[in-house]
Amino acid sequence: MRIMITGGSGFLGWNLCLGLRKRHEVFGSYIRHPFALDNCSSFKLDLTSQGEIRSCIEQIKPDVIIHTAAITNPDQCEKNRPLAKKVNGDATRILAQICQDHAIRLIYTSTDLVFNGNNGLYTEEDKTDPLNFYGETKLAGELAIKELLANFVVVRVTLMYGWGNGMNGCFTDWMLSALEKKDKLHLFTDQYRTPTLVNDTVTGIIKVIEEPHVAGVFHLAGPERVNRVEFGRVFVDTFGFSRDLIQAVKQDEIPALVPRPKDSSLSIRKFQERYHFTPKGIKEGIKTMFELRNQS
Ligand SMILES: NC(=O)c1ccc[n+]([C@@H]2O[C@H](COP(=O)([O-])OP(=O)(O)OC[C@H]3O[C@@H](n4cnc5c(N)ncnc54)[C@H](OP(=O)(O)O)[C@@H]3O)[C@@H](O)[C@H]2O)c1
């Protein structure tokens, strides 16, 4: 298959390029971070330009587009709402329109932050109610896709960890660099998520791609609902740091520009039943991450 990945330079997008390039013809986009990878063509794409989106797709002629590119930091989305709306919401509608015109299958990575976090272990049928503008723009992308396309999959992913490409990383990069300097990690006791090893997110998305007749919304996340301190303890134990470097705090003790849900953990039962795949829990996932570092 010819697969176009928007956000190929991003944390998930780059891992998808790595995971797919030996099985398919892969084209990954960037905007600020050009990259080179064997068996993967990279190209520049600015999602704020409708003409550029159309011409890239018409040149590549993909069978499938995995749309991961987004402004992913909730604080940045709040600081520049017009840009966040354009990139996360409007561009997704344009992509969906072009996919409709050319009968291209669209796979869109959305987020657990479409939920308000009052309940946790959300299913695909639960009511969405984003707490911040990032969540609103990602939800707008979902709604545009559902309105325009039959052949789509929305994969809601959540708090991914693992190795990136050094250009766009994730929260474990921040944790590791603080730990190496012996700085304290301030981790929340009252923020629950279902953390996912990014390699497992990639495996799950490959399963979605390779079953072309499946459509709909799926949650793809780790099987364990944990708070940040629980994750941090397993992380420091596995990477050989002291638990004394963890300082447990409550969300409201650390000022943030925008609110985050308290518990946006996701239920993955639908994905497990459809694809017979369960991402690793945090102990096994962090151990795998540790082993991958030693391998490379
Ligand atoms: N990371 C998580 O834990 C998490 C959790 C829930 C949902 N998600 C969703 O998963 C997807 C991937 O997240 P991620 O963390 O891997 O993202 P990321 O590392 O922040 O990467 C974002 C990507 O979007 C590209 N991009 C930004 N603005 C753009 C624009 N105007 N035009 C074209 N490309 C643009 C970036 O390109 P450059 O780097 O070249 O500038 C980069 O490739 C997103 O859709 C996000 O909403 C992620």
Image: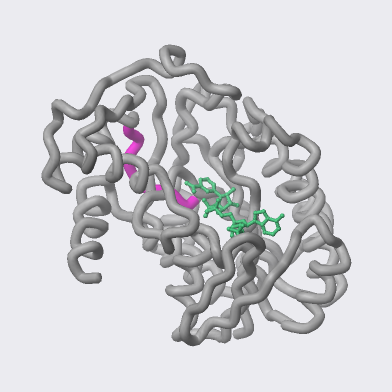
Instruction: Give the main secondary structure of the magenta stretch.
Output: loop
Q: Quadrant of residue 97?
A: bottom right
Disc tally is: 0
Instruction: Tell me where residue 13 appears, x and y as whole percent.
Output: 53, 63
Q: Quarter of the image containing the N terminus?
A: bottom right
Region rendered in magenta: 220-226
Q: Residue 158 vs residue 113: left or right?
A: left
Question: Residue drawn at (87%, 72%), measured in percent from left and top?
Answer: 101
Depth check, front residue: 72 or 127: 72
Q: Is residue 187 above or below residue 170?
A: above
Q: Is residue 124 above or below residue 54?
A: above
Question: Residue drawn at (70%, 80%), measured in percent from left and top?
Answer: 62
Depth check, front residue: 266 or 45: 45
Instruction: Tell me where residue 296 appears, x and y as whole percent.
Output: 25, 70
Q: Quadrant of residue 209?
A: bottom right
Depth check, front residue: 250 or 127: 250
Whether the magenta-drawn stretch holds residue 18 is answered as no
Q: Is residue 189 above or below residue 226?
A: above
Question: Residue drawn at (35%, 48%), measured in percent from left and top?
Answer: 173
Instruction: Tell me where residue 244 appears, x and y as whole percent.
Output: 14, 26
